[in-house]
Amino acid sequence: MGLFSKIKEGLHKTAAKLGHEIKRIVTGSPKLTGQTLEQLEHALLAADLGMAMTQQILAAVKKAYESQGSAGLDVFAIATAEVERSLSSTNATLHHHAGALTVVSIVGVNGTGKTTTSAKLAHLLQSQGKPVVLAACDTFRAAAIEQLKLWGTRLKVEVIAGAYNADPAAVAHDAITAAKARGASYLLVDTAGRLHTKSNLMKELQKVHRVMGKQLPDAPHEVLLVLDATTGMNALQQAREFHKAVTLTGLVITKLDGTSKGGMVVAIQKELGLPIKFIGVGEQPDDLQPFDAKQFAAALFSEK
């Protein structure tokens, strides 16, 4: 299955619901009335596109109607173009420290799929010929260490881990030493899930990052927040709080295939200006894909 097909399949629930609503609204009224615009607004907000993006789309629809009339009005094409323009405004490429180790910290709340994302990202980077080491810095959930080790065995990626309840900062320190010694291109650090409302846990994450920065200048070079698409706009508050605590460089959106609220990707990027680096559209190792704004926008407003 090609990349666009995977994204389209992942966004199927969102696109089907959104497409049905837009068609119903547009075919029900030959003219663009205040009521039509209000219904469009409800449909876009229901898909969790957020108020800012919704207003941007509605303004573009009104402008097109005023210049072309209803005959030339293609709401799907207009919405696709506006979303693509917004999502293309940030750099979605993963940072690569040429000739040196690049450290990527994977953060987020419990249950978003950080450990699986770390493993899938390792698989993706390996497929690009970039040697990877994984660090099991979620030392509070015993299963997380075992889960990452199982992935490491399956993908043939070395995992640096400490004992259960070990200091995660110490594990991160050792992992950088090991990754440098092995000539790895990337070190992916799987951190413990933490509620964005718990300041003590956020301080611990800051400590992990400080220790890495002392061990290797500017580390971590990427801080990726993993968000569960099925939580809809609740993910926006998580992103705000994590961004305050540890300056995020990008987002990874998982479980897109299980939600009708895939528009939250657009809303979060629009508000925080953070690039979407990867999206998860399934359970297999190769179901984590680099984000493509054009393909995502096209899939989100797919009419079929």
Image (cartoon, rainbow, N blue to C red):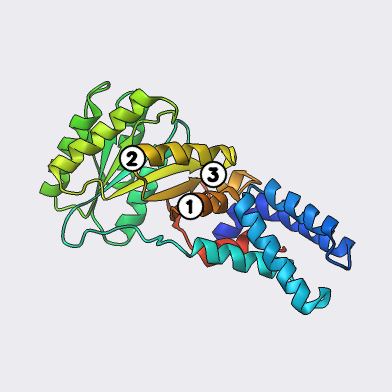
Residue in view at x 46 percent, y 41 percent: 239
Residue 120 in view here: yes
Q: Classify 10 Å Cα crowding around label 1: few (below 14), some (14-19), many (20 and above).
A: many
Task: For mark 3, give the secondary structure.
Answer: loop
Residue type, label 1? Ile
Give the total number of marks visible in the rendering. Answer: 3
Q: Nearer the viewer, residue 218 or 257?
A: 218
Mark 3 Cα-neighbour bin, 10 Å: few <14, some 14–19, many ≥20: many
- On residue 64, the disc is none
Name the residue: 75% across, 49% down.
42
**Image location of residue 129, percent across then percent down:** 27, 61
Instruction: Please identify, in this view, whether the residue under mark 1 or under mark 2 is nearer the observer.
Output: 2
What residue did someone put label 1 on?
Answer: 279
Residue named by callout 2 = 246
Point out residue 169 in the picture as x, y percentages from the top left corner. Answer: 22, 31
Tell me: residue 283, above or below residue 88: above
Residue topped by disc 3: 255
Q: Secondary structure at mark 1?
A: strand
What residue is drawn where x is 58% and y is 52%?
10
Pair 2/3: label in front: 2
Residue placed most toward the observer, 120 or 273: 273
What's the amino acid at mark 3? Lys
Looking at the picture, which amino acid does disc 2 mark? Val
Instruction: Bin the neighbour count of mark 2 within 10 Å (Cα to Cα): few under 14, some 14-19, many 20 and up.
Output: some
Residues tagged 3 and 1 counted as in contact (Cβ below 8 A):
no
Q: CA distance from mark 1 to mark 2?
A: 21 Å
